[in-house]
């Protein structure tokens, strides 16, 4: 770590403290973090959801444990040799973290005697604690944290601060029985846990766009599930024309001006029409035919939404679907279970999931900059990483394997976590048992898997991305969706302001 890097990390830690104390606003903190090389890809944090788990359904009962005798013996004997040790995990507040926290108390600690301090915090605090520990490590001291939850946007800055997964898997004396790292979906390993060809963490969380639609309405109108962009628009129009009088609109948007949700939706439509944000030279490249077609398509969809969509983030969009006010949407997979929540939803059993319609045109990663990967199924995943400065690395690795094992991952998904990062999660009997309309349903998991394996879109990985996405993209897009400027003017404004922000000639 050179002196400049050290100064930048100290500054970010100080600004995070001021942000949490209310001395500076969120925008100033994001700018400071971006200037120091630390961005955010998390949809939750980028939307301002600090320290709040994005759960759309109440907690489901924990699924039954599937520990094998060999795993139970390992935890008691190998894990038990560290009885009384306390390991610390710094994580964003997410559904899988909350559920695994319950499992720690009921299974891991009773078997091993290892105490686990897993206190979910806001992502800015995760960053501050990570920075503080890496500074301590650079000084030759041990850190205070053993395991980090990393936003994928941080991988470039922190890759050298974790113990690589290959090195960890070579520790045969601490090898958790049947862990099988190859069971993780390789697309997630690459997109959310790797940097420069090296795996630096373990995939943990994967919100991703899928298509959600009212089967009863499509059947009543004799409509097929849309498979192309043209089909999707035709279905939206048909639903709107036939159901508007009954309070159901064709679709719903997440179009709140200045909110990350608007940028998420717009980027999906731009990607689906051959657009991107950055060219292969890492320069902003918004004024393109693909981006123009994508935004024109989005505006056409807007004619078949209620006016409330211009003030909604993704929660408003999800609420419109669960309350029966929209016929079809493309949104985050983690909102699908809310449709089957009998205590809240008015459309239990009526909503189904399907693959997003095929892109009309699609660029490759090679056509883009900053590791941007176009795809209509936009993702926002994360990973867990073992700190190279961990005070208790061995028991922490034992815990990390248990927490990301096939059994615990499947149990978390069967208990409502909605984060299937392993292949086995899709075939586990406990997960498949929830493949029906019920609390914590998993009947959309096949669609989620196909989205991950073949349709996944990843936003640019540059530190300033969240500032660019909200302060420039979502602000200018808001002027477009509210009729203050046209498509061409919007794209020019985004491009010019991005160039100025990044000081690109």
Image: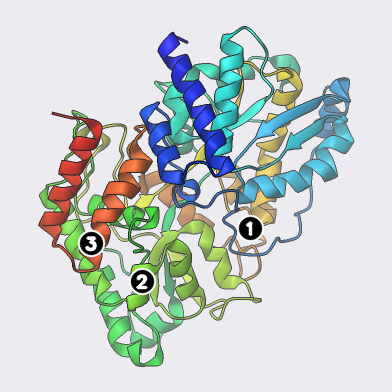
Provide residue 359's location: percent of width, then percent of height. 25, 55
Q: Which residue is mark 3?
A: 479
Question: Which residue is most to the top?
Answer: 140
Q: Compared to 501, does 215 lie above or below? A: below
Front-most of residues 467 and 255: 467
The numbered mark at residue 432 is 1
Provide residue 48's location: percent of width, then percent of height. 48, 51
The answer to which quarter of the image holds residue 285 is top left
Q: Residue at x 23, y 53 (%)?
A: 270
Q: Residues within 10 Å of mark 3 (few under 14, many from 20)?
A: some
3D distance between C-alphas at marks 1 and 3: 45 Å
State if disc 1 and disc 2 touch (CB < 8 Å): no
Q: Is residue 407 left or right of residue 209?
A: right
3D distance between C-alphas at marks 2 and 1: 34 Å
Provide residue 143's location: percent of width, then percent of height. 66, 18
Provide residue 486's location: percent of width, then percent of height. 13, 62
Q: Compared to 281, does 475 lie above or below? A: below
3D distance between C-alphas at marks 3 and 2: 14 Å
Q: Residues within 10 Å of mark 2 (few under 14, many from 20)?
A: many
In this orientation, does residue 323 appear?
A: yes
The numbered mark at residue 309 is 2
Q: Residue at x 43, y 80 (%)?
A: 325
The answer to which quarter of the image holds residue 120 is top right
The answer to which quarter of the image holds residue 103 is top right
Q: Residue at x 60, y 53 (%)?
A: 53
Q: Compared to 313, does 459 lie above or below? A: above
Instruction: Tell me the quarter of the image containing the C terminus.
Output: top left
N-terminal label among 1 and 3: 1
């Amino acid at each position: 770590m050179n002196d400049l890097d050290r100064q930048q990390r100290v500054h970010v830690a100080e600004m995070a403290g001021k942000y949490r104390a209310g001395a500076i606003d969120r925008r100033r903190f994001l700018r400071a973090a971006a200037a120091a090389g630390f961005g955010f890809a998390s949809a939750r944090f980028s939307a301002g959801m600090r320290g709040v788990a994005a759960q759309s359904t109440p907690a489901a009962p924990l699924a039954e444990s599937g520990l094998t005798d060999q795993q139970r013996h390992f935890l008691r004997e190998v894990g038990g040799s560290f009885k009384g040790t306390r390991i610390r995990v710094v994580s964003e507040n997410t559904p899988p973290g909350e559920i695994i926290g319950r499992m720690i108390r009921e299974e891991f600690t009773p078997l091993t005697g290892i105490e686990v301090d897993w206190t979910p915090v806001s992502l800015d605090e995760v960053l501050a604690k990570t920075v503080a520990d890496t500074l301590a490590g650079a000084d030759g001291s041990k850190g205070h944290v053993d395991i980090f939850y990393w936003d994928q946007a941080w991988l470039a800055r922190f890759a050298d601060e974790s113990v690589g997964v290959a090195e960890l898997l070579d520790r045969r004396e601490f090898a958790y029985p049947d862990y099988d790292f190859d069971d993780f979906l390789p697309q997630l390993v690459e997109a959310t846990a790797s940097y420069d060809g090296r795996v630096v963490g373990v995939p943990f969380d994967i919100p991703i766009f899928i298509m959600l639609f009212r089967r009863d309405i499509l059947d009543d109108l004799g409509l097929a599930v849309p498979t192309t962009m043209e089909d999707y628009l035709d279905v939206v129009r048909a639903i709107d024309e036939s159901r508007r009088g009954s309070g159901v609109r064709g679709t719903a948007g997440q179009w709140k001006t200045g909110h990350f949700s608007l940028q998420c939706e717009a980027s999906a439509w731009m990607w689906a029409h051959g657009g991107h944000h950055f060219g292969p030279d890492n320069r902003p490249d918004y004024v393109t035919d693909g981006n123009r077609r994508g935004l024109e398509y989005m505006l056409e969809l807007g004619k078949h939404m209620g006016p409330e969509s211009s003030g909604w983030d993704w929660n408003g969009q999800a609420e419109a679907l669960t309350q029966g006010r929209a016929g079809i949407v493309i949104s985050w997979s983690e909102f699908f279970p809310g449709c089957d929540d009998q205590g809240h939803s008015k459309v239990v059993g009526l909503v189904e999931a399907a693959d997003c319609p095929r892109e009309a045109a699609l660029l490759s990663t090679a056509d883009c900059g900053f590791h941007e990967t176009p795809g209509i199924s936009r993702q926002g995943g994360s990973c867990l990483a073992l700190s190279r400065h961990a005070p208790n690395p061995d028991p922490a690795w034992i815990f990390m394997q248990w927490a990301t094992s096939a059994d615990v991952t499947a149990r978390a998904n069967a208990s409502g976590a909605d984060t299937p990062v392993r292949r086995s999660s899709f075939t586990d009997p406990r997960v498949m048992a929830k493949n029906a309309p019920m609390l914590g349903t998993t009947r959309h998991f096949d669609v989620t898997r196909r989205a991950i394996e073949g349709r996944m879109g990843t936003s640019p990985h540059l530190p300033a991305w969240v500032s660019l996405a909200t302060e420039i993209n979502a602000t200018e897009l808001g002027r477009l969706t509210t009729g203050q400027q046209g498509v061409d003017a919007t794209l020019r404004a985004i491009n010019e302001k991005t160039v100025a922000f990044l000081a690109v000639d």
